């Protein structure tokens, strides 16, 4: 009986210890995701201050945002392969350190070029840490039910970072300056590295996992030239030789990427997965959603601060309802999707976005006419029905945000 009781007690202690270790690992993975997404939502509120301090062009501000996303997009598949081959814990730690180093470079950047380079380094770090984090959770939670709960919590960090990022970013910019946005993520990086130091075990699955270097290079060229053409097109001219060269390079490298991925034994992106119609449709929907979301997050803070002359704090608070709704609805949407299917929610979500854009247009239409009528009638520039001085230029044109 004593032996039985001792065995049971030892088993309970082991389970408790294992659960605690798993909880620490989950906390570290959640912090890593929160840090990467928070960085993106913070920086959007600092664009106006960066423009004023570094005398940056509109295209430069786009590079500050887009190079992070570009580096993340082109390296994330390779990041997953590196984790499987050389150890997920190792690649995760390297990713977090790289992310922190890139953020530090941004924080001390003396000019826009160094700032953009730091953003690229941080994006590369995110591409290493996030796929490794998901693989680590899959290994840490072998039970499907427990794994689903852990991954749901891990994914919820996206919504949480998006919810608090704008408001926190506005507070930081107005109180400590735009450089504080990049210093702010460093404590999260330190905590992310400290938490798994004693709880995270190494794991790998190198079987049939090979680096696809030709595919990786072609992906970088294709997406890089695509981004370069769209960002610099308005300034250089859409028919200028550099932009035409970017277009040709993008098309050629994309075609070469498809050819290489079809023939290689271990492709970075197996094209056969797109034969599944549901998967292809989901990717297309995600692409459209990302285009709309990132365009809005780039332009709306600038509009609020440049045209409406809002402070960074007020702009962040203005964005809060959108971010908070995203955070609250996302978990509920996952639960509803299991009962009514994803098509209803995806279609409904795009309909809501279209309706919101329609309402914005309706509101602007209602406002523009009365303002155009009322403002001249009450303007001190008008004397005897004639304009006594030329009207000011449009705010955005004057400040160089649009050509």
Image (cartoon, helix red, strand yellow):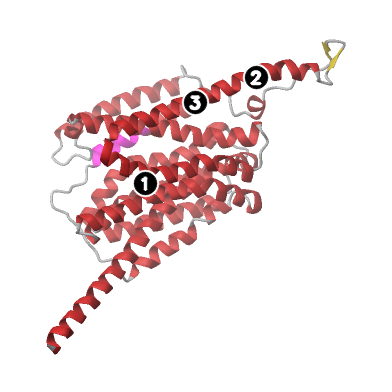
Between the residue at mark 2 and the residue at mark 1, the CA separation in whole angstroms equals 38 Å
Residue 141 occupies quadrant: bottom left
- The quadrant of the image that shows the N terminus is bottom left
Task: Give the percent coordinates (x, y) of residue 398.
Answer: 67, 26
Between the residue at mark 3 and the residue at mark 2, the CA separation in whole angstroms equals 16 Å
Q: Check the image and report above or below for 242 versus 147.
A: above
Of pointers 3 and 2, the one earlier in the residue sequence: 3
Count of all numbered marks drawn on residues in the image: 3
Q: Which mark is residue 357?
A: 3
The residue carrying pointer 1 sits among few (fewer than 14), some (14 to 19) or many (20 or more) residues within 10 Å by Cα, namely some
Q: Which residue is mark 2?
A: 368
Task: Give the percent coordinates (x, y) of residue 255.
Answer: 25, 26
For the residue labelled by badge 1, is the local secondary structure a helix, a strand or a loop?
helix
Between the residue at mark 1 and the residue at mark 3, the CA separation in whole angstroms equals 24 Å
Left or right, residue 241 beside residue 88: right
Of pointers 2 and 1, the one earlier in the residue sequence: 1
**Which residues, given as a range, are shown in magenta?**
213-223
Residue closest to the eye, 375 or 123: 375
Q: Check the image and report above or below for 223 versus 394.
A: below
For the residue labelled by badge 2, is the local secondary structure a helix, a strand or a loop?
helix
The residue carrying pointer 3 sits among few (fewer than 14), some (14 to 19) or many (20 or more) residues within 10 Å by Cα, namely few
Q: Which residue is mark 1?
A: 331
Residue 229 occupies quadrant: top left
- The quadrant of the image that shows the C terminus is top right
């Amino acid at each position: 009986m004593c032996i039985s009781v001792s065995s049971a007690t030892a088993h309970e202690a082991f389970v408790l210890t294992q659960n605690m270790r798993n909880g620490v690992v989950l906390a570290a993975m959640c912090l890593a995701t929160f840090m990467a997404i928070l960085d993106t939502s913070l920086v959007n509120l600092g664009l106006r201050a960066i423009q004023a301090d570094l005398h940056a062009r509109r295209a430069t501000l786009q590079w500050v945002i887009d190079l992070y996303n570009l580096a993340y997009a082109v390296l994330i598949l390779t990041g997953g392969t590196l984790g499987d081959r050389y150890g997920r814990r190792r690649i995760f730690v390297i990713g977090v350190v790289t992310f922190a180093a890139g953020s530090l470079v941004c924080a001390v950047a003396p000019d826009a070029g160094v700032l953009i380079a730091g953003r690229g380094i941080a994006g590369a770090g995110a591409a290493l840490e996030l796929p490794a984090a998901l693989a680590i959770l899959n290994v840490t939670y072998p039970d499907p039910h427990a794994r689903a709960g852990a991954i749901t919590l891990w994914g919820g960090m996206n919504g949480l970072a998006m919810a608090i990022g704008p408001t926190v970013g506005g507070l930081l910019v107005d109180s400590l300056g735009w450089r504080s946005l990049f210093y702010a993520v460093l404590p999260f990086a330190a905590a992310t590295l400290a938490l798994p130091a004693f709880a995270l075990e190494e794991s790998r699955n190198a079987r049939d996992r090979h680096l696809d270097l030709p595919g990786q290079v072609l992906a970088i060229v294709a997406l890089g030239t695509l981004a370069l053409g769209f960002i610099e097109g308005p300034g250089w001219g859409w028919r200028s030789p550099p932009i035409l060269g970017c277009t040709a390079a993008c098309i050629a490298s994309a075609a070469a990427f498809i050819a290489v991925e079809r023939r290689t034994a271990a492709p970075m992106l197996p094209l056969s997965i797109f034969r599944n119609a549901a998967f292809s449709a989901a990717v297309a929907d995600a692409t459209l959603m990302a285009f709309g979301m990132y365009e809005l997050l780039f332009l709306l803070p600038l509009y609020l601060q440049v045209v409406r002359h809002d402070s960074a704090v007020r702009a962040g608070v203005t964005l809060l309802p959108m971010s908070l709704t995203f955070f609250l609805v996302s978990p509920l949407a996952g639960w509803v999707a299991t009962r009514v299917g994803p098509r209803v929610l995806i279609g409904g979500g795009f309909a809501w976005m279209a309706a919101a854009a329609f309402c914005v247009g309706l509101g602007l239409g209602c406002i523009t006419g009365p303002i155009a009528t009322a403002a001249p009638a009450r303007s001190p520039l008008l004397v005897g029905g004639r304009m006594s001085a030329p009207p000011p230029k449009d705010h955005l044109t004057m400040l160089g945000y649009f050509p």
